[in-house]
Every structure is written in structure tokens, then in C-alpha cells.
Amino acid sequence: EEPQTFYEAVGGEETFRRLVHRFYQGVVDDPLLRPLYPEDDLVGAEDRLRLFLIQYWGGPGTYSQERGHPRLRMRHNPFVIGSAERDAWLKHMHDAVTSLELPQDLEKRLWDYLVYAAHSMVNAPDA
Ligand code: HEM
């Protein structure tokens, strides 16, 4: 029998759906972040982030079937991401992660990854 993936351990697609939906509920009202995202396609952005995270954690590879190799740093180049944008992103993501009420060890693994990934996405030095 295959070992359970992290994707399965946290509850599969439904959990990632809740996570990313809650995250974008925060982005919608954020004056710093909202302008970075497509004006009329926040649903598409939600789909892309959800499918990426599902794939990353061992679920179906739909993200790469639709989008190709993630190349996340490159895909973020069009957006100016400094420490303020990173921290705003992480604030909404923290709210979303804790809303899942996962077992502590799973929550920590997910959160540690998101913090690391968000730091690696910064592409603009502070003034
Ligand atoms: C796309 C902002 C961090 C994963 C985007 C987009 C924006 C954005 C504006 C375009 C939305 C769209 O898909 O149309 C930011 C900001 C971050 C951040 C301000 C702060 C650090 C992250 C992190 C991850 C991530 C940490 C992964 C864990 C993605 C993915 C896409 C995306 C998968 C879609 C890429 C594609 O297929 O085109 N992000 N992002 N982002 N972001 Fe981020």
C-alpha cells in the first residue's frame, strides 16, 4: 500500500479549496494586494493557486497539465513583491491556515512551507 500523501492526510481537495478560498477572501479587501491580482479574474487566480498547492503536496498534477512547469519566481516577476506585500500575503494565508483547524504537526508543516515560499518570492528590495 502506498504511504499516504500530505495531500490526503490533510483532507484532500476539499481542504485546499477551503484554504485558498479563505485566503482570497482576505485579498479581495486588501488595498496593497488587490491591485496586483487580475481585476476580473480572481476566480482564475484562486484556481491556479489551489491546483498548484494540491500538486505540490502530492495530489493530482492538474496544475502542470494546464500551466506547465510552475517556475513560480519567474511567474511572479511581473509583480513588485517587497516585504510589505510578502507580509500581507502571509497574514491572509495564516488566517486561512488556522481556519482549517488541522492537527498541529500538519498545520506546522503547511505553514512552514508557506513562510519559506513567500520569502523566496520577494523580488523587490526595501527602499
Ligand atoms: C500567481 C502574488 C506568493 C503561488 C500570483 C499572482 C499574483 C501573485 C499577483 C497572479 C494571479 C493569477 O494567477 O492570475 C503573490 C504575492 C506573494 C505571492 C504578492 C507574496 C509573497 C506566492 C507563494 C506561492 C504562490 C508563496 C506558492 C506557495 C502562486 C501561483 C500562481 C500565483 C501558483 C499562479 C501561477 C500561474 O500558473 O500563472 N501570485 N504571490 N504565490 N502565485 Fe503568488
Image (cartoon, rainbow, N blue to C red):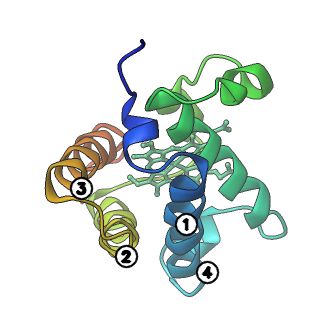
Task: Say whether marks 2 and 3 touch (CB < 8 Å).
Answer: no
Q: Mark 2 — residue?
A: 99
Work out how far the residue at label 2 is from the one at label 3, CA to CA, in angstroms. 10 Å
In three-dimensional space, the C-alpha distance between marks 4 and 2, rounded to whole angstroms, equals 17 Å
Query: Which comes before the other along the chain, label 3 or label 4?
Result: 4
Q: Earlier in the sequence, mark 1 or mark 4?
A: 1
Residue 76 appears in the picture as rendered: yes
| Residue farthest along the right direction in this orientation | 40
* Mark 2 C-beta to ligand 1 under 8 Å: no
What residue is at 50 percent from the left and 83 percent from the top?
Answer: 30
User: Which marked residue is nearer to the observer: mark 4 or mark 2?
Assistant: 2
Give percent across and percent down for residue 53. Answer: 51, 40
Say which element carries label 2.
helix
Q: Which residue is mark 4?
A: 28
Between the C-alphas of marks 1 and 2, the distance is 9 Å
The amino acid marked with disc number 2 is: Ser
Query: Which corner quadrant of the image does residue 121 belong to?
Result: top left
Q: Residues within 10 Å of mark 4 (few under 14, many from 20)?
A: few
What's the amino acid at mark 3? Glu
Q: Earlier in the sequence, mark 3 or mark 1?
A: 1
Q: Which label lies toward us, 3 or 4?
A: 3
- Asked if disc 3 and disc 4 are in contact, CB closer than 8 Å, the reply is no
Callout 4, which amino acid? Val
Q: Quadrant of the C terminus?
A: bottom left
- On residue 18, which mark appears? 1
| Quarter residue 89 falls in | bottom left
Q: Which mark is residue 107?
A: 3
For residue 54, side relative to residue 3 (left or right): right
Residue 104 appears left or right of 96: left
Residues packed near mark 2 inside 10 Å, few (<14), some (14 to 19) or many (20 plus):
few
Tell whether label 2 touches label 1 (CB within 8 Å): yes
Up/down of 69 relative to 10, above or below: above
